Structure formats: C-alpha cells, structure tokens
Amino acid sequence: MAKATRVFVLEDDARTRDSLLRKLAASASIEIAGAAGSLADARAALSGLGVDAFLFDLQLPDGNAIDLIREQRAERPKAPTLVISVFGDEERVIAAIEAGAQGYLLKDDSGEDLADAVHRAIAGESPISPAIARHLIRRFQATPNTTEPASENPLSERELEVLQLAAKGLTYQETAQILGVSINTIGTYTRRVYQKLAVTSRAQAIFEARQMGWMGNDS
Amino acid sequence: MKRVLMYGAYGVLYVAMPLIVLAILYVVDQPYNVPSAYRVLPTEWVRSFSEAPPTNGWSDDTSRWPPGRQDGEPFTSVWYRYTVPERLDTPTLYIPYGFGNFEVWQGGTRLYQLATPKPPLAYSRTSIAVPLRDGDVGSRIEVRLTRQASYSGIRYVFVAPSDLAARDASDQALFETQLPIAVLVLMLGFAAAVGAMFALRPKERHYGWYALTIGLWAAHSIHGLIEAIPFAHFVWFALRYVLLNWLLAELFFVNRYFGIRAPRLEGFCAAVSVLVSLGLIAVASVAASSLENEARFFASFTVVNLWFLLLAFIVTSRYFVAVRKHWDFDSVSLWLASAVVIGIGIRDLVYEAMPPGTVPGSVFYLQYAAVVPLILFGIQLIRRFARDARTAELRNEALNQIVEERTTALEKTYQQLSEEAQKRALAEERSRLMRDMHDGLGGQLVHALALSEQVDDADLKRALRLALDDLRLIVDSLSPTANSLQDLMASYRHRVSRLLQRTGFNVSWDIADETDSVTLKPNEALSVLRIVQEAVTNAVRHSGGDTLQIAVARVADGLQLTIRDNGAGMPESVVERGLRNMRVRAAELGAGLNISSTSGDTAVTMHLPLAGGAPAT
C-alpha cells in the first residue's frame, strides 16, 4: 500500500459530513481529497483535483447528484462512485447505479466499514443489498419485447446465482462459500452486473426515446 | 313450355275459383225462393199519373221495359196488370224487392200503399206481401210503381200462398237487411280495430290503407240501407259508385302489405279514379235538370263501371305479383279471393243489366263475397299486429335484461375502479411515507448519531442506533419492492448479518423457499420483523451462548418462526419483558407465541396462521 486513496465526499448535512470525514480520516489508507455540501461547490472543487473514489449523497440543496455521477464517470472512469444512503434500498440508489455508481454505503457505517467499502470498490467489488439484487434480477429477466436482438438475458448463469443469493440477504462471504469461489470473485460478478445494468439502461433509454420519437428516424 | 304450362295452371285456377264459389252460392240461394211456378208476369202496362187504375191506354207489349221518366214529369208512374193464374186458398201478391213506391189494387179497391212515400231514387229495397181479396183464376190485379225517378220495372212478382210468401219475405229480410247489417257491423269493427292499430303504428302504412278499404266498402253497403236521403238524389245515387274507390285503397294496401310498391301505377290509378269520381259527381249534380242530363248520368255509369272493373283487374294482378314473389298462404289465398270478388262482381253487373230470369239467383252477391277476403285480411293483420306486439314485448324484456346486466357490470367496474383508486391512493401514501422517512427522519437520525459521536455519549448513541434500526425495519416492512416474507427476511438478514458476525455468534439462517409465496400486509410484516428483532437482540445480549438459529418454515396451516440459541437461558426479568412485548405483537397478528428457556436451549417460537392455509399470492 504505497499510496493512500484520495476520497471526495459530497454530503449536504454538515454534521453527517464531518462524521464521515472523521471516520474516513481515521483510516491510514484513506486521504481526504476534498468535500462539498452542494453540487456547485463540488463541481468547483473537483476541477483539476486528483480523486480515487467519490462518496456522494444524492439529494442536495441544488439538485440531484445523478448528473454529477455521469460527468465523473466520463472524466475519471477509474474512480468509483459510492452513494451515501441511510437505507441502501432507495429507488434513488438504484437510479444512481444505473447512472454508473458502483455501490452504496450506509451513513451510519463505522469508519472501518467505510474505508473497507471504498477499498473494495476500487478493487472492483460492489456492495449489494437484497432490494438492489431483486431490482437487478427483475430488470434483466423481464426482458421487454424490444427490437434489440441481443436482449436475451445478458447475465451469465453465475452472475444470476450471485444476484439470487444476494436477494435472499446472504453476505458475499456466505455466497462465496455456497458457490465455492473466492469472495473477490463474487465482488467481480457484482461489479460486472452493475456495469451491464448501466449499459443496458442506457440502451433502454435510447430505445424508449426512439419509441417516443424524440430522436430522428434514421438513428 | 314449362312457363306456358305454369301460367296456364294459374289461369285455370283463377277462372275456376269464382265459378266454384258462384255454384255454391246458387245452391245456397235456391231454397229461399218461392217456387217459380207461382211467378206471374205482367199482361199489360200503361204509363199514367192517374190515382186509380186507368181505364184505357194499356199496352200488351211486355217484351220490353216501359220507358222511364219523360220531360216535365217529376217522377215515373207505371201501372202493371197481372192475372191470378190458379186457384189458391190464401192468395198473396208478393214482391220480394223493388225500388220505389208500390200500390196494389184489385177490383177497383186499393189493397196496399206505403204509408209515407219514399223519395225517388232511394236505393233501399222494398219487399211487400199483400193478401188478395179475390183469388179466382183470371182475376185481375193492378200494381202501380210510382215516385221512381227513372227505373220503371218490377223484377219479380208472385201470386203465392201466404205462408210461402211470408217465409220468403223473412228470408229476404235476412238477406237484404239483417245479414248486410251484421256484415256492416263486422266491417266497421275491423275498420276500427285496424284503424286503431294504424294510430298506434303510423309507420305501418298498410294498416291505414286496409282500414280505408274496408271503411269505404262498409260505406258502400250502408248506402243501400239508408232511406232518408240527405241531399240531391242523383248525387246520392252517384255516391254509391264513388265508394267503389275502396278498390283504389285496396291497391295501395296490397302493394304495401306485400312490399311490391309501384308508385307510377298507383299514381295513374289514383288520378283516373279521382277524375272518374269527380266526373260522375259533376254529371250527377246536373242530372235532375233535364232528361238528357239524366240519360248522360246513367250512361256515365258504364264508364265508371268499366273503370272500376279494370281497377279490380289491376288489383288482382298485384295479388298475382305477390304470389310470384312470395308464394305463401297469404298471397295465394288473397289472389284467389280477389278472383272470386271479380267473378261475382261481373255476375252482379250482368244480373243488374239483363232482363229478369236471364241470370240465375235472386240477390246481388258481391256485398257478401267482397267482405270475405277483406275479413280474412283483417284477421291476418290483427294476428300479425299481436305477434309484433308480443315480439316487441319479448325484445323489451331482453333489452331490460341487457340493461340490467350492463348496469351490474358497470357497478362492478366502478367498484373495481374505486378499489383501484383506493389501492393507488394507499400506494401513493406509502411512498410519501417512505420519502419522508428517507429524506427526513432517516437523515435526522443519522445527523443525531453524528452529534452523539461528538459528545461521546454511549447511551444516546445506542438509543439513536436502536431508533435507526427500528426505522429500517419500518422501511423494509413498507417497501413496495419487498413483496414476500422471503424478501422481508432477506432485507433483515442483510441488515443484521454484519453486526451478528461481530458478536461472534455462529448464526444459521433457514428461511424456507415457500415463504416466497407468502405476502403480508405492512403492519403484519412490521410485527413479524419486530418479534424477530426482539428475539435476536435478546439472544445476543443475554443468552451468553455462541450459536443462533433463525428459521422460518411453512407448516400445514401457516408459518412457523423459530429463534433458538444455546445460551444459559434468559434472566426471568428479560423473559418477562420480552414475552410481554412479543405477545402484544403476536396478538396483533393473531399468532401464537411460545418461549421456552432452559439452560443450553432457549427458543422463541411463533405460529402464524394464514387464511385458508394457502399462501396469499
């Protein structure tokens, strides 16, 4: 561990933000790259900043962080975004994942848990709640009667198994044990599912837009 | 060839029918007559206005009728002389019917005179039976026919026994007065009935035309029964012919009844009929002014009769069209009936025009013959009307039923809709609550937790964490995506596994897959989660064991929920408090709760019965 991970925190509640920053700072492997309480502040602070991971609260005084997630995905594709949530099952969290977020963490998680979640995200693991897993299963299985030729279930059998176990509330560790693979493999599967979701939701959005005639017929 | 044969058959049928009916009428007609042996013919006649039998001027030329009214004469007056042909016990002079006023004289004495003379041209008939004073063979009788406008002949005169004369007179009354009145009443009845049907269903034009047809024919018949002529005699006389326009009405009726309308033909017939009728009335209105005009008036009858005969043939041809089109009982029977009417009409015309004895029979037949098809028609129409009314009623019933069904369906739909609306409202309310918890309460609790970390108050921190945990249970129980008990337990497992892992307990979960088909209402879900939470918390905090088993199984009539640990058993106070809390929640659920606590094995068991034993899906 040569270099500490630089984390940027976006959270509008000052007390919660301080609490998060304190917990993160307590970990030797984490360095605070910056923090903001609004989208505008975040955009201003982020320009030219070196960041390895983002922690974003979604509902902010000046709007929703979803767009910022997209922007940062384009700008810093290697830096994962984690959504800060109270419950981890909000529709907004799912929307954020569809926008490219790699996972979520709970606002009341301990410092240890927070640091752990950040490192795992950078390593390519994505945390997943049963609610999110259920959503993903439904999303991929209920293949809409689109004209997309490749819209047969894009998940591999293993990925689906992982999701199904997650939907039953099993931890990565338990899932790894049941499937007889390493815990890292489970994280990779989850990450891949997240990426597929982001991709398919984009394809889905384009398809719907075309259906509604928003885009040219030639597109 | 086949066509020729077919039309030939039609023709034979058409001619045969009236002949058959006529033959039947003759058979019926005969028995009522006084035997023709008693008939007497005049030996002499004289035109004279003398109030007693004239003494001279008698003519014995009986081969022709005496001439009619001459210029300057108000009416005719002809004396006829008859002689008694044979010796009879009760000799009676009998005239079955005649038009005008009669006087009967014998041996210079007047035996009979109508008390009130009828006006000339009255169309009503007179039937007289006068007992003779002198029944000797060769005894002379004078009969005066007077106050007649034109006609001066007496068709039948009998000298017969009084009983025979009386019997025939009553027959005559039956045929000439009573039967026509009965037929008239019948016709008026049908006219009224079908007229009423027309009033009810004005769109069914053929009802109206039928009512007019039979009404006109009834009026035609009434004409012969009225003695008091209400206006100019010749016009009254002409009216009888104008009423033959019932044939025109019949034409309109037939065309509509059988759906074979022919507007141009109808227009032509109507125009000619109106012209003929108006012409006849015009001629009649001046007929009294001179003998020439009177002659013209009577001559015009030929035109009128010819026209209505032609019209009768047109009508019968329409019946034939109907036969060709429908070939059913209605069309065929009515076509043949019209053949009979025409045949009998022709017979009556000839009977009237020819000298007595030329044409057999004693009365006009048309008045009866024409009624039969009309009455048949009326019956058919009334039957049809009744059937239509019944059909309409049935349809109405069916319609009512449909309306009722639709109403019920609508009510049901409305109910479903309002249920949907309620569900939607509930769902909206639920998601609003969720939003409030996520954005408000949840965030505030986290904020408070962050605060408590700063002041480093462990109790406050624990209290806030408990509140946050409970709020998570509420959120999970309300979650619109957690539809089944399995989903609920999954969320719970996910939330607590990390914490449980840290406690050092060896936790085993056994959530039966069947719980996937069990859905609970939010309040029930929350109660279940809280019971589990309470039991798990108790085990972790107080048992002192290291193994925890959490199981949910589907049993015959419901769910079995078990939280078991291998600890030393709980302190009495904890058991009591936990029991109390859990019992309250179990009671809300209608579930049975049991806590068994012995050293090394403590189990909280809840039995939740499900409606019908089958999972709600």
Image (cartoon, rainbow, N blue to C red):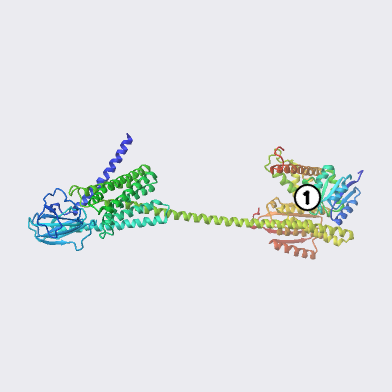
Displayed quadrant of residue B232 = bottom left
Given residues B53 and B305, the one toward you in this image is B53
Q: Residue at x 18, y 48 (%)?
A: B355
Categorize mark 1 by other alpha carbons within 10 Å: few (<14), some (14-19), many (20+).
many
Displayed quadrant of residue B520 = bottom right
Left or right position of A140 against B287: right
Given residues A108 and A168, the one toward you in this image is A108
Given residues B48 and B103, the one toward you in this image is B48
Number of numbered tags placed on the structure image: 1
The image shows residue B450, relative to residue B306, as above or below, that is below
Q: Is residue A126 visible?
A: no
Left or right position of B394 against A17: left
Percent from the top left, x then y, of residue B542?
82, 60
Q: Residue at x 16, y 59 (%)?
A: B103
Q: Is residue A166 visible?
A: yes
Given residues A53 and B224, the one toward you in this image is B224
Percent from the top left, x then y, of residue B361?
20, 50
> Quadrant location of the C terminus of chain A?
top right
Q: The disc numbered 1 marks a residue on which chain?
A: A
Percent from the top left, x then y, of residue B388?
42, 53
- Taking the view exactly as shown, the residue that stands out farthest to the top is B1
Displayed quadrant of residue B586 = bottom right
Amino acid at pointer 1? Val
Percent from the top left, x then y, of residue A98?
77, 46
> Quadrant location of the N terminus of chain A?
top right
Q: Which residue is mark 1?
A: A93
The image shows residue B146, relative to residue B313, as above or below, that is below
Q: Identify the secondary structure beneath mark 1.
A: helix
